[in-house]
């Protein structure tokens, strides 16, 4: 009797997306066998092992120099006769963190002003996207600032993807200053702008509205600088 020749079984054909796409679009790719109902990932039917969902890439890959983020006209308006017009740079952590600050006593020498800018950029990891990490940091910063005695919080529009302002007063060495801290997120970058003002030798303090508007003006400059550094 003639023995039949045995042939190796044909391997199953696996279908996949032709191009890598952000995680939010992965639901549109089909393997022909359905997908997990919870969307947490899929299982390789051949190997029986879970696969890791693709995370969206970071929107911004670089940070601008901290002292170059605020326009010179803004510095002149918010901190007249700043002691160091070019600003005092904060430590730069390999493009992940940066910042700058300006201080001065105004044109008459009796109006103290302090402006500070801090930037932090996040990169995607195996467990969280860069944007999600920035969102979490934004929420943490707002919650922390709200704990200051007498602090008031307001939502700010037109500055990045989301922004909030926290106003408060602080007394140091018997001088009470009017302070405003604006926290903004643009993509995977979190921006913190602090602007403080106080009248010295009996001079009036700037109003809360003046300080808040100043912080917002500087924050818009910083967000624009982030976009420009990545264009």
Image: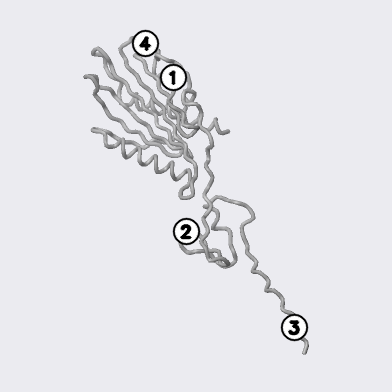
Q: Secondary structure at mark 2?
A: loop
* Residue identifier under label 3: 4
Distance of mark 1 from mark 4, alpha carbons?
17 Å
Distance of mark 4 from mark 2, alpha carbons?
59 Å
Task: Tell whether 210 sits left or right of 27.
Answer: left
- Bin the neighbour count of mark 2 within 10 Å (Cα to Cα): few under 14, some 14-19, many 20 and up: few
Q: Secondary structure at mark 4?
A: loop
Viewer-proximal residue, 40 or 231? 40
Q: Are marks 1 and 4 in contact (CB under 8 Å)?
A: no
- Of callouts 1 and 4, which one flags the residue occurring earlier in the amino acid sequence? 1
Q: Which marked residue is nearer to the observer: mark 2 or mark 3? A: 3
- Bin the neighbour count of mark 3 within 10 Å (Cα to Cα): few under 14, some 14-19, many 20 and up: few
Residue 27 image offset from top left, x and y in percent: 54, 58
* Residue identifier under label 4: 107
- Of callouts 1 and 2, which one flags the residue occurring earlier in the amino acid sequence? 2
Label disc, if present, on residue 40 of the rendered structure: 2
Residue 5 image offset from top left, x and y in percent: 75, 80
Quadrant location of the C terminus in the rendered image? top right
Q: Which marked residue is nearer to the observer: mark 1 or mark 3? A: 3
* Residue identifier under label 1: 87
Relative height, residue 25 to residue 224 (above, below): below
Distance of mark 1 from mark 3, alpha carbons?
86 Å
């Amino acid at each position: 009797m003639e023995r039949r020749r045995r042939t190796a079984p044909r391997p199953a054909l696996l279908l996949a997306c032709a191009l890598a796409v952000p995680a939010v679009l992965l639901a549109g790719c089909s393997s022909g066998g359905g997908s997990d109902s919870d969307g947490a990932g899929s299982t390789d039917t051949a190997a029986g092992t879970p696969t890791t969902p693709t995370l969206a890439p970071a929107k911004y890959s670089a940070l601008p120099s901290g002292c170059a983020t605020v326009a010179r006209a803004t510095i002149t308006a918010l901190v007249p006769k700043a002691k160091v017009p070019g600003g005092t740079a904060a430590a730069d952590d390999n493009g992940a963190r940066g910042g700058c600050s300006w201080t001065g006593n105004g044109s008459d020498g009796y109006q103290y002003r302090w402006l500070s800018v801090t930037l932090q950029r996040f990169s995607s990891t195996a467990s969280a996207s860069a944007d999600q990490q920035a969102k979490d940091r934004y929420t943490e910063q707002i919650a922390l600032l709200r704990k200051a005695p007498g602090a008031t919080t307001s939502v700010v529009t037109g500055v990045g993807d989301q922004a909030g302002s926290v106003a408060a007063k602080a007394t140091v060495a018997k001088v009470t200053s009017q302070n405003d801290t604006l926290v903004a997120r643009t993509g995977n970058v979190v921006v913190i702008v602090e602007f403080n003002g106080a009248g010295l030798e009996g001079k009036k303090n700037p109003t809360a509205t003046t300080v808040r508007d100043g912080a917002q003006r500087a924050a818009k400059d910083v967000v624009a600088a982030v976009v420009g550094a990545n264009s």
